[in-house]
Amino acid sequence: MTRRGWLEWDAEQARDWIAVPSAGDDKYSRGVLGVRTGSDDYPGAAVLSVDAAIRTGIGMVRYLGPARASNLVLQRRPEAVTMPGRVQAWLLGSGMSSSTRDEATTTSLDDALTEGLPSVVDAGALDRLVGDAWSGGPTVITPHHREFAGLLASHADAPNSAQIAAHPGEWAARGARRLGVTVLLKGSVTHVASPSGVRLTVSNSPAWLASAGTGDVLAGILGSLVATHSARAQADADALAALAATAAYLHAAAARRASSGGPISALDVSTAVPATIAAILRG
């Protein structure tokens, strides 16, 4: 289905971007995601992003963040690794604020971006894409309308958040071209746009999904998918658009499964991801 030139992503397309392990795989070949999310103010974002990444089928998550957040992550997910080491993709910025971020955290974000690995950049790390740290590696950003307006503020004819909300597809496409990154613009309809012109939408998200922490879950799902397809994302930047749309589809489908028509929390959505993936793989 198309919407004014935009392709609606569905389960059949998403299925092609879910990596199913073989008998010969191990935790390293299944993908290792480096995660720098959460803060002293918002440690829960770290828990949610790591929990969702693990439930999406990654081989290993390396969480590198503040001590309090690390402790909470390990309480929830003891299989997470909190020591630095080799990773195949990065998830950066969820649960951080650029206005309160300390120098050490800024340096750690910049160090990750200079590696040139496929990266998912959210919330409090978005501002690092307009500086010298970003290597220009394969990158997908996951802003909401206000964050996206702030990121585009230095450009000519910069929109405000209300203008982006009124015309999300137009601004997602413009932003992808201007910034040179794949854009996943969150909303009741999610718009995914790549610099080369890929245009994808994901609809039918339950309204109950508009609650605290669900964006951190989406970031974790996407980070996991990117890490499991790291080589492909490095060879073809447009792979990030398909992975972003797949993450948005999984997120919405897991929310529908968890909700059954009623209220849900962010952890409810994360918990529903494995069964949602199984249903998609069964067709």
Image (cartoon, rainbow, N blue to C red):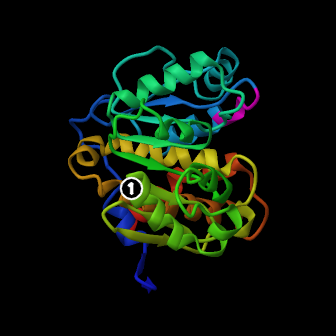
Name the residue beneath numbered marker 1. 243
Magenta span of residues: 41-45
Query: Above or below — where is 220 with respect to 209?
Result: above
Residue furthest front in the image: 156
Task: Give the answer, above or below, for where 184 lies relative to 137.
Answer: below
Vertical order, 149 against 39 (above or below): below
Residue 249 position, x and y percent, is: 50, 64
Residue at image location 33% in from the left, 35% down from the top: 117
In the depicted structure, whether residue 72 falls above or below residue 56? above
Check residue 42 for magenta coloring: yes
Q: Is residue 125 left or right of residue 188?
A: left
The residue drawn where x is 65% and y is 29% is 76
Q: Give how far across and how far down residue 252 sits, in percent.
A: 58, 63
| Residue 246: % across, % down | 43, 60
Secondary structure, magenta segment, majority class: loop
Q: Quadrant of the N terminus?
A: bottom left
Counting the numbered discs, the total is 1
Q: Secondary structure at mark 1?
A: helix
Residue 279 can be seen in this image: no
- Please name the residue shown 76% across and 28% down the image: 41
Please state if 87 lies on the left or on the right of 235 as rendered: right
| Towards the viewer: 123 or 24 | 123
Q: Is residue 254 magenta?
A: no
Horizontal side of 94 relative to 209 (left or right) equals: left
Q: Residues within 10 Å of mark 1 (few under 14, many from 20)?
A: many
Residue at 30% x, 41% y is: 230
Viewer-nearest residue: 117 or 218: 117
Query: Which amino acid type is marked by label 1?
Result: Leu
Decide if residue 36 is in sight here. yes
Q: Position of residue 283 (x, y in %)?
A: 39, 70
Q: Residue 86, located in which quarter of the rendered image?
A: top left
